[in-house]
Image (cartoon, grey):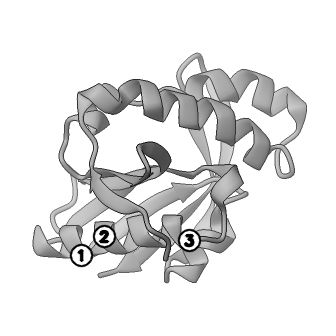
Amino acid sequence: MGDFIIRAATPADTGHVDALLQRTYPRLLKADYPPSVLVAAIPAMTRARPQLMSCGTYYLAIENGQVLGAGGWTPDRKRAGWGDIRHVVTDDRHLRRGIGRAIMEHSFATARGAGLQHLECWATLTAEPFYASVAFQRIGPMTVQLQGAIDFPAIRMQRAL
């Protein structure tokens, strides 16, 4: 682990998360998605969701005032004991420093503390190996419908807490 801290995001962090997503997603996803998919999907994927920024369970990894990563969870309103992993990203210039893993471990601990027993994520093709490394099991391929009727290939994954 580095010298970064993990803290809950607030609405005041929205611009920093937008910048992180806009800078990082195009670079990380280009190896696994054709340009025809990315040109439509990237604009829909690179905006911080206001409800996440104020939910208390969406976290930032910060070092020297710079946001290096973000991610968290929200409860699944349809399934008791379940939660959903939400919008995880690590700055591509700071990969392999344990930032994503630290955000996930913090998320697991707080989700467990909130009484959840299971988490689900809809992983990008790029992120599937990362989620597998933190004990998510592959359920199968899926298509995520992004705003603007954009079909985005993903992998449904789950893990027990």
Q: Quadrant of residue 158?
A: bottom left
Q: Position of residue 90 (x, y in %)?
A: 57, 54
Q: Earlier in the sequence, mark 2 or mark 3?
A: 2
Amino acid bearing label 3: Tyr
Sort mark 2 into few (<14), some (14-19) or many (20+) by Cα contacts within 10 Å. some
**Numbered circle sitting on residue 109:** 1
List the residue tagged with mark 3: 131
Q: In the image shown, does 23 or 83 lie closer to the viewer?
A: 23
- The residue mark sitting in front, 3 or 1, is 1
**Disc 1 and disc 2 in contact, CB within 8 angstroms:** yes
Amino acid bearing label 1: Ala
How many marks can you see? 3
List the residue tagged with mark 2: 106
Q: Position of residue 132 (x, y in %)?
A: 59, 78
* Residue 115 seen: yes
Q: Residue furthest front?
A: 64
Q: Which structural element holds mark 2? A: helix
